[in-house]
Each structure stands twice: as structure tokens, then as C-alpha cells.
Amino acid sequence: MAQAHDLAGLSPRAAERPAPARATTRGEKLVVRVFRKPAEVETLWRGMERGHQVPVHQTFDWCAAWAEMPGIETRVAVIEMDGQPAILLPLEIVRTAGLRVARLIGTRHSNANSPLYSDAFLAAADAGLVAELAAALGTAGIGADTLVVDKLRPTCGDQPQPLLTLPHVVSQNPTFQLPLFPSFEATLAQINAKRRRKKFRVSQRRLEPLGGYRHEIAGDEATVQAYLTEFFRQKAIRLSAQGLPDVFSEPGVQQAFRRLASFDANGGRPVLEMHAIVLSGENEGEILALAGLTEKDGHVTCQFGSIDEAKTPDASVGELLFYLMIERAALSGKTVFDFGVGDQQYKRSWCPVMTEHHDVFLPLTAKGRLGALALASVVRLKRFVKTSPTLHAAAARLRKLGVKAKRPAAEADD
């Protein structure tokens, strides 16, 4: 059934001056209206996000959490076609190398992206209409030199991603998915069921001397916030050991995830569901592994995860948690378990499906033309390094040397 949206969700007083209408070869007219804050188009946004082609990262609640980041400058572009909302682009404006870049809100912590489209636009979208869209955005007064729409899924539901008719590059990181079936046996059969069950039993046996364990899902505000506090601690230790920056320590990031997982901030329905492996017995309450999951339209995504390797280095508690989360998702009728962005061996071991995402760099000003080329070149270079085993290993060694050099001498010698 086609989506129908009226314009009641728009706030005329908050809108910027609309760009001139642009007629396409079929006679549709595109008009871009730019708003400053997500709340100004909340009603319209919540209506459009019901489409099954919209990732969780472009839902109102997800973007509203990231829009609270300190110092963030937001824009929401609503593109109308024949007087009806056809596309919604939630954007943040950042400065990089002298450029003003518009990118999707919170994209640094998203795993898949897409503009919000109406069914009518998806049905009509072809290269000509998308070219008209690009031209309309260039005159819309978004306040940026370059528009970046990255980590685009290749499809929107059962339709091709319209923006991929524009020049684009393959994203530097793929994502990995495990299709789910009502039978957990059928789900495991895709990835060597016998080996998976054996690893599961080994993990259980190795936790028995510690008093056993339980799989918990945070069900109240105090628990979910305690889980997040422990996750941020575990992740900081892990990232430091890998020679990677702690992206979760950047200003506002922890607050955004706390809001997404909160029962209080989301009317009792957190966007982010926190899972944990917790010890029982004499070690009651010690948290060994954590993960944050989202779900939309049967598509479950692991947004992040961490383990405490110091307590049980040989129990594979991360694998244990994934086994239990995947089993629960399959038996509850979900259709996909998505391990998210990043090529890691444990993801390949779980997932028979790898999905390449794509990045679009659209110049909005003359200055932005060079910026778009430069940004696309950076992604190509990063992808080249990550897909070369030799270069990737060398980059990892350099990161670890950098971390070691920053540590106090006594610690570095240990």
C-alpha cells in the first residue's frame, strides 16, 4: 500500500525559504524545504519512517538522540514531489578541511543508511528524477558545500537505492548478515551447526567452575544504565589494546547511547536493547559480555559489543552471547541478524551474507566539487588499505606502536 503523508507535520515558521520547483521530464515537481531542528518535522518524520525500507538509523528517535550532541548544527531537508513529501534527509553540518559538509545525523555510529523515501518516489525514481533531486538540493540553501550520504544499502526494501544512479564509491567497510529462520536448527545449518553447538557447550562448561551464568536483557532504567557504564569501561580497555581511538569517549556519544537505551526517555520502549552474560553463584552479578541491539521490521542489528577478557579469557563469552541472542531472535520471528559495519573474522564465521555499502558525495557549491572528489578519494584509499592484507597489517602495527609510545615508560616495558 502506498504511503500517504500530508504536510501537517511541517512547521512553516521554522522552514527556510524553499528552493525553486524543478520540473522533471515527466512533469513531477520537486521542492526542497529546509528545517533547523528534527522536532519541527516530527509528525511527518514518524509517518515516513514506517516504511520497511527505512533503516533504524534514520528513524526519528535515533536521530533525535544524536541531534543532542554538544555543538551540533542540524538541518532536515524535506523534498516534496507534486505537493507531497517524497524524501526526508536528516543532516548534521560539520567542518572538515575548510569545507562545510552535510552528512546524515549520527552517521559515525550507524551501520546502514538511507534517506527516507515515500513509496511514490521509489516507484518513479530513475536516473533522470534523481538528477533533478541533486540539482534541487544544490539550490536549497542547506548551508553546506558537499552532501555526503554514506553507508547506503544497495536496496530500499525490494527497490534499488535511488541515489546509486549518482556517482558513488564502495564504502570502506562491508556489513555482515545472518538470515534467520523460525527453526533455529535451520538458521545454524547455514554456518556449520555442529561446530556452533560444540563451541556453545564448551563455553558453558568453562563457566561452570565460576558458578555458571545467565543471559540477561536489561528491563529497567537502573539496569540498562549500569550495563552501559560497564560497556564503556570494557570497550575503552579493548580499543586501547588494539591501538584504536575510543570513539565512545568523544563528547556527547555516551549520552546519546544512554538516551537510546533509556526506558525513561523513550516511553518505556528503548530503541537500543542491552544484552549481557552475567555470572551466577559466588561471582554473582559480574558482567562478562555486553551487546546493544536494535530491531526494525524484523531486521536485528548489533550496534556494539564488548567482553571482559581478564575474567574468562578462554570461555569465548562473546560467542556465547551471540549464540543466545541469535537463537532468541530466530525463535521470535525476526528475519535477519546483522553484525554491522566492519570486516572481522568472527563476523565472517557467523554470516553467509556480506553486503557492500556505498557512499555518495554530492557537491552543492563550486567549492564543494573539489571537496566531493577529495572525500571520495579518501574512502577509496582507506578501502584499498583495508582490502590489502599486507597494508592492513602494517597499519595495525603502526597503531599499536603509537599506543605504546604514549604509555608511561614503566607500563610500556611490562
Image (cartoon, helix red, strand yellow):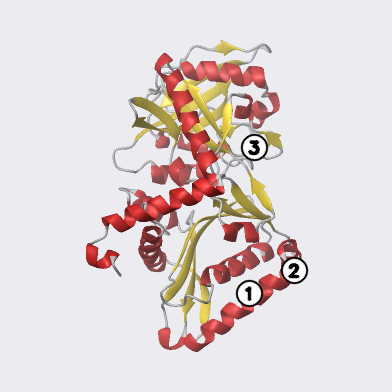
The residue at which mark 1 appears reads as 199
Residue under the image location 61 percent in, 21 percent down: 130
**Dot 1 amino acid type:** Lys
Q: Position of residue 232 (x, y in %)?
A: 37, 61
Which marked residue is nearer to the observer: mark 3 or mark 1?
1
Quadrant hosting residue 345: bottom right
Q: Is residue 370 left or right of residue 114?
A: left
Q: CA distance from mark 3 to mark 1?
A: 34 Å
Secondary structure under tag 3 reads loop
Closer to the camera, 4 or 65? 65
Quadrant (top left, top right, bottom left, bottom right) of the C terminus: bottom left
Residue 154 image label: 3
Q: Is residue 361 left or right of residue 142?
A: right
Quadrant (top left, top right, bottom left, bottom right) of the N terminus: top right
Quadrant hosting residue 352: bottom right
**Dot 2 amino acid type:** Glu
Closer to the camera, 297 or 389? 389
Q: Is residue 5 above or below residue 151?
A: above
Residue 9 visible in this rendered orientation of the protein:
no
The residue at which mark 2 appears reads as 185
Query: Neighbour class for label 2 at 10 Å: few (<14), some, many (≥20)?
Result: few
Q: Is residue 159 above or below residue 203?
A: above
Q: Is residue 188 above or below residue 86?
A: below
Q: Earlier in the sequence, mark 3 or mark 2?
A: 3
Q: CA distance from mark 3 to mark 2?
A: 29 Å
Q: Position of residue 147 (x, y in %)?
A: 46, 26
Q: Position of residue 195 (x, y in %)?
A: 69, 71
**Dot 3 amino acid type:** Pro
